[in-house]
Each structure stands twice: as structure tokens, then as C-alpha cells.
Amino acid sequence: MKIVLATQNKGKVREMSAILAPLGAEVYSLADMGIDTDVEENGVTFAENAMIKARAIFELVPEGMGVVADDSGLCVDALGGDPGVYSARYGGMNTDKERNALLARNLSAINASNSKARFVCAIACILPDGSAVEVQGQCEGHMTDTEKGEGGFGYDPLFVPDGCGGLTMAEISAEEKNRISHRALALEKLKAELGKR
């Protein structure tokens, strides 16, 4: 199957390609397809945003290709679930560094650096015949208000996943992240669903 990943995020392209390619899928980025568009994500849930993106990009890809779109983000209990669906545009900040600094300040202000949190990933897959598959994965953990680690992207330096010895998502290996991450778990569910078809 030929699959287009409906994201401009290079970190997501790397992670999703690493997980999907061994399944025998030919994986293409939007750049590979010459698609340069920003889909307005106006859903109120991760699942709604993933499907909005998948359907929009499916209209732009050649016949016979499928589309995989995800919407993912960080939900922090002490912040009422924020940044949630606004993770990529939290506080109107433009870079990971700025968003992480804002999140760390917000956690520190309410003494919530150990707050329970989770990364959530909703995936919508539109198959070449137009049928859809939707799945979701979560990675549970807690927050720290001090960035640690050089790996990963986004909020990884502030998120400590359960069962990783206190290391942040940015400190564990790419292989380990691809095993436990919200995106990996959602992609495993997608793999299982596609296997039933």
C-alpha cells in the first residue's frame, strides 16, 4: 500500500515512517508528493482534527494512495488538560523551545511539576477505496518543569513516561520511544485494524 503522511512535522514523518515502513507500506511525505497546504484544524478533539486532515489530503493525492493523518498532543491534569488540542500552538508561541518554556512556567506557578499527564495520538487513515479507520493511543507519565534530553521533539524534554526510570521522552532512545509512544501505540492499533481487512 502507498501511504501519504498528512503532516509537515519532520519529527512525526520520521517516527511514523520508522513504524509503518516495516509493514511493507510505501510511505511518502507531503513534500514527496509536492503538496504544500495547511489544513485548518478546527475540531474540538484529537480524533476530529485527525479526520479533518486525512479527508482534506485524500482529496489531493493520486488515485490508489491512502492517507494517514494524526493529531496529537500533551494533556496535563493540573492544567485542566491543557495544552490538549492546542499543543502545537500553545500560548501562540512559534517554537518548541518557546512552548516548553511557557509550559514549564505554568507548571512552576502552581507547583505542579509532578502532575500526571499523557501524550495522546489520534490517527485517521483513509484507504485508497475511501473507507476510513480511526484509532487512538496514549502514553501515560508525569511532568517535570526542567527540560532534559536532546532527543525527540515538542514537549518530549518535559514529559517523563511511566516505566522509563525517570528519564524524559527526550532522554530515551528512538527505538524505545517508537515502542512506548502514543504514536507508536496508535500505529500498532492501526496495523491491527488494517490486518482485519
Image (cartoon, rainbow, N blue to C red):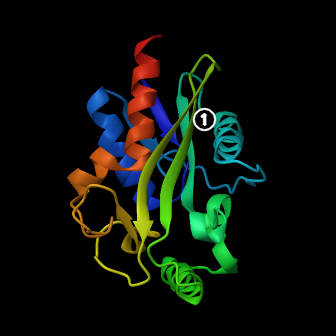
* Residue type at tag 1: Val
Residue 23: percent from left, percent from top: 30, 28
Q: Which residue is mark 1?
A: 61
- Nearer-the-camera pick, 189 or 77: 77
Q: Is residue 94 above or below residue 177?
A: below
Q: Residue at x 28, y 45 (%)?
A: 179
Residue 138: percent from left, percent from top: 47, 46
**Horizontal side of residue 84 vs 177, given as left or right:** right
Residue occupying the far top of the picture:
197
Q: Residue at x 56, y 45 (%)?
A: 70
**Horizontal side of residue 171 vs 146, given as left or right:** left
- Nearer-the-camera pick, 133 or 121: 121
Q: Is residue 93 above or below residue 151?
A: below
Residue 116: percent from left, percent from top: 48, 63
Q: Judging from the image, what secondary structure is the residue with disc 1 in?
A: loop
Q: How many marks?
A: 1
Residue 29: percent from left, percent from top: 47, 47
